[in-house]
Amino acid sequence: MLVEPVPPTAEPVGLGELKAYLRLDTGDEDALLAGLLRSARALCEAFTRTWLIERGAVEIVPVVSKPGARLAGAPVGAVSKVEALYADGTSAVLTPDRYTVVYDAD
């Protein structure tokens, strides 16, 4: 399963909050701290398998004849489009009667 998430527009904790917690007054290390915030969010999301910030994504899953393909990005708030990608490079948008969505506790 290939997931291409759209980067979040904000982090769960802002740079200002982090600097206040660390008692930093200067902006000398803002780029480093911002990178550490992004890394911490990404590691947390990978470990918990849950996205902390709402954002879009493109996910490619194998075609299955029976229910069983699970989306890797979670939680899922909406599915805006399901598209079939063919070996010859063409694609087609599937109508809702051509696929099944199964909701579960995850």
Image: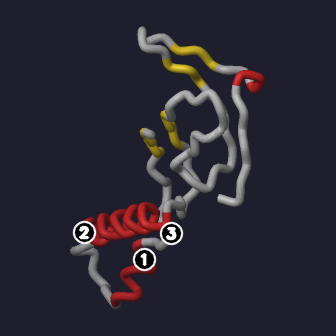
Give the residue at mark 3: 12
Q: Secondary structure at mark 2?
A: helix
Which of these two is toward me, 37 or 44? 44
Q: Which tag, 2 or 3, sits closer to the chain's start?
A: 3
Q: Amino acid at mark 2?
A: Leu
- Residue 25 vs residue 99: left or right? left
Q: Which tag, 2 or 1, sits closer to the chain's start?
A: 1
Task: Tell me the mark number nearer the camera, choosing from 2 and 1.
Answer: 2
Residue found at x 58% / y 30%:
64
The numbered disc on residue 16 is 1
Give the residue at mark 2: 32
Residue 22's place in the image compared with 87, above or below, is below
- Residue 99 vs residue 92: left or right? right
Tell how many labels: 3
Residue 60's place in the image compared with 28, above or below, is above
Q: CA distance from mark 2 to mark 1?
A: 13 Å
Residue found at x 45% / y 40%:
1
